[in-house]
Image (spheres, rainbow, N blue to C red):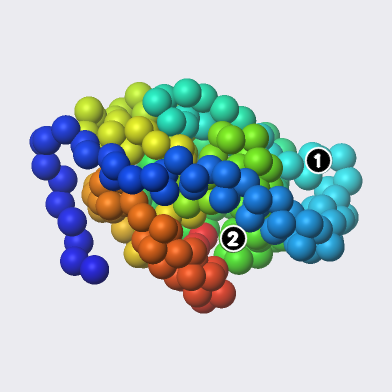
Amino acid sequence: MDRPTIDNEELRVAPNRYIYWKGMIEFFISLFLLVLLSPLLFLICVSIKCCDWQAPILFKQVRVGKNEQTFLMYKFRTMHPGAEKRLNDFLDKNEIEGPMFKLKNDPRITKIGRFLRKTSLDELPQLVNVLRGEMALIGPRPPLEREVAEYSDTDKKRLTITPGCTGLWQVSGRNELSFHEMVVLDLYYIENLTVWLDLKIFVKTIGTVLLSKGAF
């Protein structure tokens, strides 16, 4: 697929019936995946607790969703306790352009956390967010409030639909892409949303996770 570009026109959300059924379809898929993966989820929980018995298993973080509404997003904890308070110590080492933060060798990440991130297993609790209607399986990734504070009007267009666990950005280069490229891909997805595009992203996500491409 050719890389789309951003223009200044009003965003055209794809007008089709699929967008109305998308939430219901993804609800049942997420429920099925939670049941199917329950043994793996239990094993991950035990592994995290064995590394630090007193620290929580889940990491809850306020994210910005559809129409700039905030919600608590769930992930398996991959960092040492208190890591969020140390963020300012590493902002000058940011390895991604734009209002996002990524650091490949972040010292705040635990050993088990590094594995979970590399395999994207830390994202599995977000299936609960999908069941709650706060996220979709596929869509733009939900940003942090401090990131949205730096958004331009064009950047905010990616907040017009329900955020997803995976999306076009993740299967097109992930953390290897700049923030601008992520926005371009998200807006392309919003304007061209179809069941076939979702299926294509879902299949590509499996390959991206297995290859751990762009994950850190």
Q: Secondary structure at mark 2?
A: loop
Q: Residue furthest left?
A: 8
Using the image as rendered, state which of residue 94 and residue 39 is in the foreground: 39
Q: Give the x, y percent position of residue 145.
A: 45, 27
The residue beneath circle 1 is 55
Q: Quadrant of the N terminus?
A: bottom left
* Residue at x-position 85% and y-position 50%: 49
Q: Is residue 186 above or below residue 201?
A: above
As drawn, the label of residue 120 is 2
Q: CA distance from mark 2 to mark 1?
A: 20 Å
Question: Amino acid under label 1?
Answer: Ala
The crowding category of the residue bearing disc 1, from other C-alpha atoms within 10 Å (few below 14, some 14 to 19, many at least 20), is: some
Residue 180 shown left or right of residue 80 in the figure: left
Residue 42 shown left or right of residue 194 in the figure: right
Q: Is residue 137 above or below residue 176?
A: above
Q: Give the x, y percent position of residue 208.
A: 48, 70
* Residue at x-position 52% and y-position 36%: 87
* Residue at x-position 19% and y-position 66%: 2
Using the image as rendered, state which of residue 150 and residue 29 is in the foreground: 29
Give the image quarter of residue 156.
top left
The crowding category of the residue bearing disc 2, from other C-alpha atoms within 10 Å (few below 14, some 14 to 19, many at least 20), is: some
Using the image as rendered, state which of residue 138 and residue 147 is in the foreground: 138
* Residue at x-position 35% and y-position 33%: 160
Pick whichever of labels 2 and 1 is earlier in the sequence.
1
Q: Secondary structure at mark 1?
A: loop
Q: Give the x, y percent position of residue 65.
A: 47, 32
